[in-house]
Image (spheres, coloured by chain):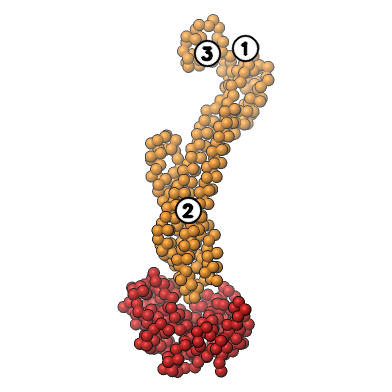
Chain colours: A orange, B red
Amino acid sequence: MARALREGAFALWHTGTVGALSALAVGASLLLVGLFALMVDAAQGLSASVKDRVEVDVYLKNRFSPNSAEQLAGLIAEISGVSEVTYVDKDAASKEFRTLFGDNLLDALSTNPLPASLRVRFDSSSDVTAAARAVVDAVEGNAGVESIDGGELWLSGLDQALDVATGVAIFLGVVLCVACAFAVSNTSKLMVLAQQEAIEVMHLVGATGAFVRTTFLIGGALQGVIGGVLAAIVLLMSGGVMGSWFQAAASFPLAQVAFGLVLLGLVLGVLGSWTSLNRVLQAIAS
Amino acid sequence: MIEFQHVWFEREGRTILADLDFEVARGEFVYVLGQTGSGKSTLLRLLLFDPRPTQGVVFVGEYDSAMIQDRQIPYLRRRIGFVFQDFKLLRDRTVFENVAFALSVTGTKGSEVKNRTLKLLSRVDLMHKRDEKPTSLSGGEQQRVAIARALINEPYVLLADEPTANLDLESTERVMEILNDVNAKGTSILMATHDIGLVERHPLRTLTLDHGALVI
C-alpha cells in the first residue's frame, strides 16, 4: 500500500500544472458545495427558529363561557404538534394591548372591546405547518369562535420556499460534484498517459493489475483530498468573516462541513479516476 | 525450462510464427537469429504469455501457456527478466530508482529493495551513477541499467531483444561480458540479434528464424 501511495503521489506530481489546476478546480467546486451546505443549514435553522415562535390565536365570542373555552382548549391540546394552549381572558388581552400600544386608545372606549382568546403554541420539532392547519380545521365553524389568526398560510409558503431552496442547493451540489469527478477523471487520464512507460515496465516486471490500478486510484484520491483540504481551509478561514457579517453564521457547523468536504473530495477523487482508468489502461495494454 | 511445442502465432490473418518446436535447458545461453520482421521479438514476447500462441503450447518453468490464468501471469514475469533494444528506462527517475522500481512494485520490503539494488548496480559497475538520470548516461551504460533492472527479481530466464543493436563495439562487449557472467550463475538467456559478427565472436547455440519458421 505504501508503494502504491508513493507511486500514486509520483504520478500526480508528474501531471504538473494540469494536476495543480485540476486540484484547484476541485477545491473551488467543493468550496461551493460547502457553502451550499451551510446555506441549507442556515435556512433550516432560521425556519426552526421562526416555527418556534409561531402561534395561532383563536378569538372567542363574548357569550362563550370560560368553561366552554377550557373544553375547546382541551380539544386543541390533543392535536399532534401542539405544545401549549393558553386561555387569554378579556382583561389579560386588554393588559397586553395597553403594554403594546399604550393606554390612550382603550381609555377612549367605555367598554373593553377585546375578545378572550386561546393562544396555541407548537412543538418546533414537529411539523408546525400541519399542526397549525389541524388547529384551524378543528376550531373553524365552532359556534363560540369569532375568528382565527392562523399562521398556516405563510408557514406553508415558508416551507415551500425552503423546499425549493434546498432542492436548488442539492441540484447545484450534485452538478458540482459531477464536475469534480470529471476534473479528476481527466487528470487521471493524463496521469496514466504520462506514466505509460512506467505502466508497461510495471506489467513486464510482474506488478499485478490491482497494484497498477491502485496506484492511479490513489493518485486520483490524493487529488480529490488536496481539493477537499483547500476547500476546507478556505471555508474555515471565511467562517470568521461570515460570523462578523451575520449572527447566524456564528453557529455554522464549520468543522463538520470542512471534514465532510475532505471526505467528499476523497470519494469523488476515487470515483473520478475509477471511471477513466479501466478504459485508458485497456487502451495502453492493447 | 523453456519449451515450444508446435507453436503458431497469427496476427490479423498473417502468420508471424510457424510451427516452432524446440527446448532450452536450464542455464543455457541461446541466440535467436533472423532478419528484421522474422519473428524474433514475437518469440520472446510469447515467453511472457503476452500474447499467447494461436496454436501449440509454450512452457516456461512450471507454467504453460494453455493452462496459466491471467492472474498468475504477473508471478511468472517476476521470474523472467527482459532487456530491450531501446532500454525502456524511465527518464524521470534516477538509475537507482529505475532498478529498484522493478522490485518495489512487487511488494518487496524497502530495506531489501535498497540492498539488492545497490548490489546489482555494483555488479554492472554503475554505483557511481546511481543518482543520475538515464538521459545523462551513454547507450552502453543505459543498457547496463536495463540489465540490472532485469536481474533484480533474480529471474531464471533472461530475455534480451537486440540488446546491443544501438551500442558500439566496446559497449557491446561489456554487455556480453555481463550476460555471460549472469549465465554462468545459472540464469538461462535467450537473446534475439541479427548481429552475425557478435555471434561469431561469442559462439553459442543458435535458433535461426526465417519468415517465422525455424531454419534447421
Amino acid bearing label 2:
Gly
Q: Chain of mark 2?
A: A
Q: Is residue B156 visible?
A: no
Q: Which residue is mark 3?
A: A94
Which residue is at a point 52% across and 71% down the rendered structure image?
A208
Q: Which residue is mark 1?
A: A62
- The answer to whether marks 3 and 2 mark residues whose Cβ atoms lie closer than 8 Å is no
Q: Residues within 10 Å of mark 3 (few under 14, many from 20)?
A: some
Residues at marks 1 and 3, CA–CA distance in whole angstroms: 14 Å
Helix, strand or loop for disc 3: helix
Q: Residue furthest top?
A: A110
Q: Chain of mark 3?
A: A
Helix, strand or loop for disc 1: loop
Amino acid bearing label 3:
Ser
**In the rendered image, the vertical position of residue A232 relative to residue A8, given as above or below:** above
Q: Chain of mark 1?
A: A
**In the rendered image, the vertical position of residue B116 relative to residue A237, given as above or below:** below
Question: Depth check: A177 or B104 in front?
Answer: A177
Q: Which residue is mark 2?
A: A265
Q: Residues within 10 Å of mark 2 (few under 14, many from 20)?
A: many
